[in-house]
Amino acid sequence: MTPDVREADVAVIGAGQAGLSAAYHLWRRGFRSPGSSDQHATGRTVILLDAEEGPGGAWRHRWDSLTMATVNGIRELPGMPTVDTDPAERSNQAVPAYFAHFEARYQVPIERPVRVLRVENDPAGAPGSAGTDGGTGSAHLLIHSVGPDDTPRAPIRTRAILNATGTWTRPFVPTYPGAAEFRGAQLHTADYTRAEDFAGQRVAVIGGGISALGHLLELADAGAATHWYTRREPEFSDEPFTQERGSRAVAGVAERVAAGLPVGSVVSATGLFWTPALREAERRGILKRRPVFTRITPHGAIEADGATTELDVLLWATGFRHELTHLRPLRLHNRHGGITMDGTAVAADQRIHLLGYGPSASTIGANRAGRAAVAELVRFLDAGDDAHD
Ligand code: FAD
C-alpha cells in the first residue's frame, strides 16, 4: 500500500439530495471523518466527495426561470425543517442555500470540488484476503479523484461506496441524420439559461416531458416561434397528480431495475397532467405537437410528412442518463445495458449502492434511498467484521 492512500469504511460520492440524505443517516449512526474526535463517533469512518464548488448538487445549475413556484415539488432533507422560501425565488439559489444550512447544521465535512474519475477493486485486496468478492465485505475499493484544476488527489481505500452522482452531467441527445450539418444553434435542457435569448427565433423543442413543456411556454412568452416535436403522441391526464399515481410510477421503475433493465427518469414515468398554464398554452396553440422530423438539414428539418421547416435553434429536451462513468471499471452493467439492483445495492456487488438511481431519482426517493442504503450498509459492514473476528 502506498503511504498516501487514505482509508475510510465508506465513501459517499455526490452531495445532492441523495448524498446528503445518506450523510445524515451515516452521521446518526456514528460514522465520522477519519481522525474525528467527536464523542459520538463509533470508530466507523466516512469520506464525502462532491464535484461542485459549493452546496446544492445539480440545483446549482437549473435555469433562472425555474423558480420555487414552478418546480415539481422539492422534499425537505431529513432532519432539516423546511426553509420558508419565496415562491418567486430562483430554485438555483433557494435550494443551494437550503443545502448549505443543512451542511452547516450537521457539520457535514464534504470535500469539494473533487471529481471522482474511477472506482476500481483494490488490486492489493484486503489484509488477509486474496480476492475481490463483493459479497463478503473482504475486498476493498480504490477511489481515484482530482481536485481543483484537475490536480490528482491521494486514492481512497474503502469497504463500500454510496454513489449519488445524479444525472445532470450526462445530458442525452438522440442521434438524427443530418444533425452535425445544422448551421443554427443546438442546445440541451442542461445548457438552457434564458428564454429571452431566443426572442424572434424559430425554435424546435424536441422531447415529450415536463422540461419540454416548460421550455415551450417560456419561449412562446419571450417571442420565439416554437415547434414541438415528440416521438409519441403525448398523453395528458385530467386527474390531478396524486401520491398514489406517483407510487405507481415509482413501482414501475423499481420493477425495471430489479429486472436489470435500463431506466429512464421517474419524472418521465409519472406522465403529463394538465395545469391551468398548460390549458392556456393549448388554447394559444403552443402545444400543437408534430411527430419527430426524419432528417435535419443545415437550415431546418424534413418533417415526417416530407415538408421542410426552417429552424434557427434545436433545443433537445430529451432527458438525462445516470452519471456512472466512474464506475465502469467495476463492470456493473449486464447484457441488457442495465444494472440489476437489490434495493439500493447492486445485486452482484453489495459494496456498492446507487442512490438517486431508478426509482429513487426524485427528491423524495433520494431521501428514502439514503436511509435504506445506510441501514443495509451497516448490516454489510457488521457481517464483514464478524467474518474477520
Ligand atoms: P444531483 O442533485 O444531481 O447531485 C449529484 C451530485 O453528484 C452533484 O453535486 C454532482 O456534482 C456530483 N457528482 C457527479 N459526478 C461526480 C463525480 N464523478 N465525482 C464527484 N461528484 C460527482 N425532482 C423532484 O423531486 N422535484 C423537482 O421539482 C424536480 N425537478 C427537476 C428539474 C429538472 C430540470 C431535472 C433535470 C430534475 C428534476 N428533479 C426533480 C429530479 C432531480 O434530479 C432529483 O430529484 C434530485 O434533485 C437529484 O438528486 P441527486 O442527489 O440524485 O443528484
Image (cartoon, grey):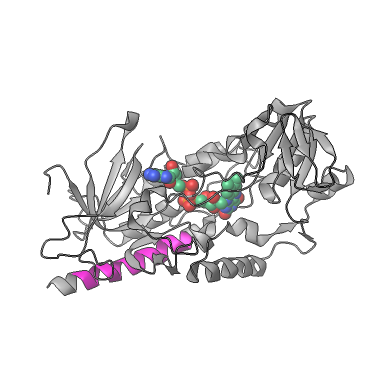
Res 24 → quadrant: bottom left
Up-down relation of residue 194 to residue 373 (above or below): above
Percent across and percent down for residue 169 are 49, 42
Q: In screen coordinates, is 379 left or right of 167?
A: left
Where, by quadrant of the figure, is residue 340 drawn? bottom left
In this rendering, would 295 be left or right of 15?
right
Q: Position of residue 37 (x, y in %)?
A: 17, 50
Q: Nearer the viewer, residue 129 or 357?
A: 129
Q: Is residue 153 above or below residue 339?
A: above
Which residue range is magenta in the image? 367-384
Number of labelled discs?
0
* Magenta span includes 374: yes
Residue at image x 42%, y 60%?
333
Q: Residue at x 22, y 53 (%)?
A: 8
| Residue 277 seen by the camera | yes
Please provide percent x and percent y for residue 83.
53, 47
Residue 308 x/y as whole percent: 83, 36
Quarter that holds the C terminus: bottom left
> Residue 90 appears in which quarter of the rendering?
top right
Q: Can the viewer see residue 108?
A: no
Q: Main secondary structure of the magenta part?
A: helix
Residue 190 located left or right of residue 283: left
Residue at 72 percent across and 37 percent down: it is: 296
Q: Is residue 235 highlighted in magenta?
A: no
Residue 203 falls left or right of residue 330: right
